[in-house]
Amino acid sequence: PQRSEDARGPAGTRDPRRRARRQVIIVGASGDLTERKLVPALVSIARSCAEPFGVVGFARRPKTDEQFRAGLAEAIPAELRAAWTDLAPHVHYQQGDVENAEDLAALERRLDALADGEPAGRLFYLALKPDLFASAAERLRAAGLVTRLAAGTDAPFRRVVIEKPFGRDLSSARELLRRLHSVLDEHQLFRIDHYLGKETVQNILGLRFHNAIFEPLWNRHHVELVQITVAEDIGVEGGRAAYYDGAGAMRDMLQNHMLQILALVAMEPPSSLDPEAIRDEKVQALRGLRTLDSTDAAQHSVRARYARGRVGGVEVRGYLEEDGVSPGSQTETFVAVRTEIQSWRWGGVPILLRHGKRLAKRFTEVQVQFRTPPLQLFNRPEGMSDAELGRQLRNGTLCQIRPNILRIAIQPAERITLSFGVKRPGTAMVMTPAELTFDYQSHFGRATPPAYERLLLDAMNGDATLFLRAEEIEASWSFADALLDAWKAPEAPPVEDYEAGSWGPESADRLFQGCEGTWSRG
Ligand code: BG6
């Protein structure tokens, strides 16, 4: 997607006398997201953005501008300190409650004053509990802080950013979307899935549609299976249990981040890089997902939760022992599912998705595994009979034909690897595995920017490509809801236990039934 002019323009020094024409208002600014992610991202944007903007934190706790700035300054990473000094005078704090009309009127007066009465675009980031999103948007609208604007209008923008979870099932998501749409136009709503802000996730589109060699193979004729893993080594700590215990791995990761990655892997080529063209194709791919009924779920899904174990050499608690988890909780911290996308391109290709907390290591990866050649010509020792060759291939003494696998490592490694076989030097025709690798860090000599930086910049510029459209959220919930329902049936797979620091329950291996392959270990 195109960046707007100001993002590409030369790094401008911020003139402190020049008032902001754009304002980013963080509603609920006292949460840790503000200092951990949002403000560092805004500081980094300010560093390379010629057009100035202001930041206003809005929250209930009483604080002065100076106190707010001092709290933020502590969390600014060393490499952003200089840029923070430039932005800090444009960072303000307004005490108030989003539920209170007078507080919102005071916020509006403050925003107007900070813009010197000039018209300014306003981006409201709702850093609030998800069940407050709809009412907060309604209150902002009632207070006149946001208004419904037609797409393409010249009026200063009014946008609202929210971040998952968007509901806890299809019907609550629809209700949230309906209420947001009753306040604002779709083009004013920016729904974050932070995985789309990751450079390596965006590159899935580039890899597929800028290179002619992959696309002809990217279908059921050549692809044997697709697997996506999001493995985490962290557990559910730091006060997250209250949310997580009511959500679980399925709602927390698979329904959103993982299906977004899958949508990019599986979508048809868009006609352009226009946000709607891309999102149309993602929606189509998600709608093609085969939902699992209770019989499928018994066979093709696995759920489990971590038990006590060791991660990185450190003894850790089991999920049920974490603070805030209800006794007897049946919440899963691991989910693995086998499904497919019902389309001409993908029909019959197993799509395997796996996510777990407290696994052996942290990595996110997509593997596209190609079909093997129909005949094994190589690796036959001289004079070996067909029967002996067959036996040795079966028992693994001889190198079998290994499928070519394209691995797209999303994090923490950021690389793309294509595996293939090469002939080992010598007189025997023996093949050995080799790889072609592209690595972001070594190729570009720098780390990729954090997801929030890209997403906030795009929201400020009104580019919705990397944000979720309502239909994507609905299609993802349709898939997740069916599985969550199937898990309530008597034949549902039990919630198994796996040792923290392991690769999850062994039963997840059964999802490969009928195909070559194993779960990736990153
Ligand atoms: C969040 C989930 O959306 O994503 C967390 O709620 C999870 O449970 C996190 O840990 C993972 O994000 P990342 O970018 O660290 O992979």
Image (spheres, rainbow, N blue to C red):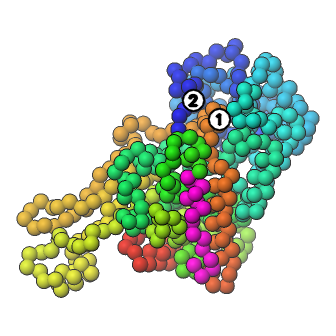
Quick one: quadrant of the C terminus?
bottom left
Q: Classify mark 2: helix, strand or loop.
A: loop
Kindly report the distance in space between the C-alpha atoms of the residues bearing marks 2 and 1.
9 Å
Q: Is residue 297 above or below residue 246?
A: below
Residue at image location 44% in from the left, 78% down from the top? 513
Residue neighbourhood size for the residue with mark 1, other residues' Cα within 10 Å, grouped as few (<14), some (14–19), many (≥20): some
Residue neighbourhood size for the residue with mark 2, other residues' Cα within 10 Å, grouped as few (<14), some (14–19), many (≥20): some
Direction from residue 396 to residue 102 in the image, left or right: right
Among the two numbered marks 2 and 1 on one chain, the one whose residue lies closer to the N terminus? 2
Q: Residue type at mark 1: give it.
A: Gly
Direction from residue 186 to residue 404 in the image, left or right: left
In the picture of the structure, the residue carrying the numbered disc 2 is 4
Residues at circles 2 and 1 in contact by the CB criterion of under 8 Å? yes
Residue at image location 53% in from the left, 38% down from the top? 1
Residue at image location 79% in from the left, 57% down from the top? 175
Direction from residue 400 to residue 490 in the image, left or right: right
The majority secondary structure of the magenta stretch comes to helix
Quadrant location of residue 60?
top right
Q: Give percent across and percent down for residue 179.
A: 81, 50
In the picture of the structure, the residue carrying the numbered disc 1 is 462
Q: Is mark 1 within 8 Å of ligand 1?
A: no
Q: Give percent across and percent down for residue 288.
A: 57, 64
Q: Residue type at mark 2: give it.
A: Ser
Q: Nearer the viewer, residue 229 or 461?
A: 461
Q: Give percent across and percent down for residue 142.
A: 88, 39
Q: Give percent across and percent down for residue 387.
A: 18, 86
The answer to whether any part of residue 316 appears in the image is: no
Q: Classify mark 1: helix, strand or loop.
A: loop
> Quick check: is 379 in the magenta stretch?
no
The answer to whether any part of residue 348 appears in the image is: yes
Q: Which residues are magenta?
A: 281-296
> Quick check: is 289 in the magenta stretch?
yes
